[in-house]
Amino acid sequence: MAPPLSLPCSGERCRGVRKVLAAVAFGFVAAAAASMYDDVEMVWGADHSFFYMDGDVDTVALCLDETHGSGFRSRDAYLYARFDIDIMLVANNSAGTVTSLYLMPEDVPWEYHDEVDLEFLGNVTGEPYTLHTNIFANGVGGREQQFRLWFDPTADFHTYSIVWNPKHIMILVDGVPLREYRNEAARGVAFPTWQKMKVQGSLWNADDWASAPPPGVAWCGDEPPESPWFEQQAAGDAAALRRAREEHMLYDYCADANRFKHTGLPVECTPASN
Ligand SMILES: *[C@@H]1O[C@H](CO)[C@@H](O)[C@H](O)[C@H]1NC(C)=O
């Protein structure tokens, strides 16, 4: 099937939408012969979005104006997967905008809510974005970590990845692991293990949350959950994760002793005794 809409990839990504305040583009390397439109659907703000080819990459541009933003989700849901999404963020004055990339199940009660969340918080012209991340499992979130990117995310596409397998969840930027959340169910840490999630992307205005909402799937693991392969992956990343902490981390809930002074640190923030 041909891409439904092909637009030039210039500064006018969102032409046709009047008074565009901000635009972001998500690129997907199409798997096999499928076009991206076969993989994702608009959830809201369809009139504020465009599918087009950026070179040979299927791309969706999301736009935001005074009335609303826009968002998409994958048509399929996945239990364990690796998602690699190329994103070019809103340039110039992006203060108040939030570009999100997240995994979420559909139609589950809050106590079963799982979510892996990347939010790019815009800034005024010339000032850097913040990458805000969070992980929810069984309805409990509050696991915020924030990072400063080491490049201008508005100048070009960069690859943002979520790896989710039975051993851990990893967040990577251009292949650099920034965050790992390990499956430590054995010591009572909640971890998403049983429900499928859809990958979603959106652009919205944080100043106006009321009118706002709330892929390119590279592979879906054939690897059995107990495969040592997952552990090897994690072990190789330990040094890189430490470096990312030192060089790029702005905030870590696990290091926020004041916040948890009455409750004690969440279990996953305490050393495992083994
Ligand atoms: C905006 O830039 C300022 C100055 O560099 C920085 O302190 C602040 O954290 C940035 N805000 C966001 C939302 O990233």
Image: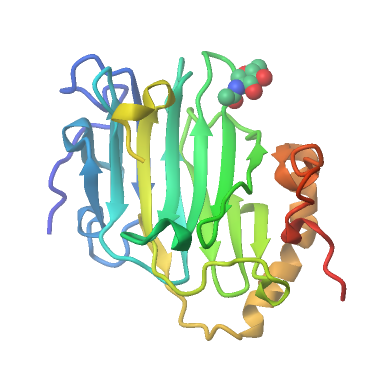
**Looking at the image, which is closer to me, 214 or 261?**
261
* Rendering coords of residue 164 (x, y %): 53, 66
**Looking at the image, which is closer to me, 100 or 26?**
100
In the rendered image, the vertical position of residue 51 relative to residue 124, given as above or below: below
Number of numbered labels in the structure image: 0
Image-based side of 28 in relation to 42, left or right: right
Extreme residue in the right direction: 274
Which residue is rendered at x = 12% and y = 59% of the image?
1
Which residue is rendered at x = 36% and y = 41% of the image?
214
Confirm whether residue 128 shows in the render: no
Image quarter hosting the C terminus: bottom right
Image quarter of residue 90: top left
In the rendered image, the vertical position of residue 175 relative to residue 183, given as above or below: above
Extreme residue in the front direction: 262
Confirm whether residue 192 shows in the render: yes
* Rendering coords of residue 128 (x, y %): 60, 23
- Quarter of image, ligand 1: top right
Image-based side of 136 in relation to 55, left or right: right
* Rendering coords of residue 257 (x, y %): 81, 41
Image-based side of 217 in relation to 255, left or right: left
Which residue is rendered at x = 71% and y = 44% of the image?
253
**Looking at the image, which is closer to me, 137 or 156?**
137
Image quarter of residue 11: top left
Instruction: Tell me the colour scheme of the image.
Output: rainbow
Image-based side of 260 in relation to 19, left or right: right
Which residue is rendered at x = 63% and y = 49% of the image?
143
* Rendering coords of residue 88 (x, y %): 43, 35
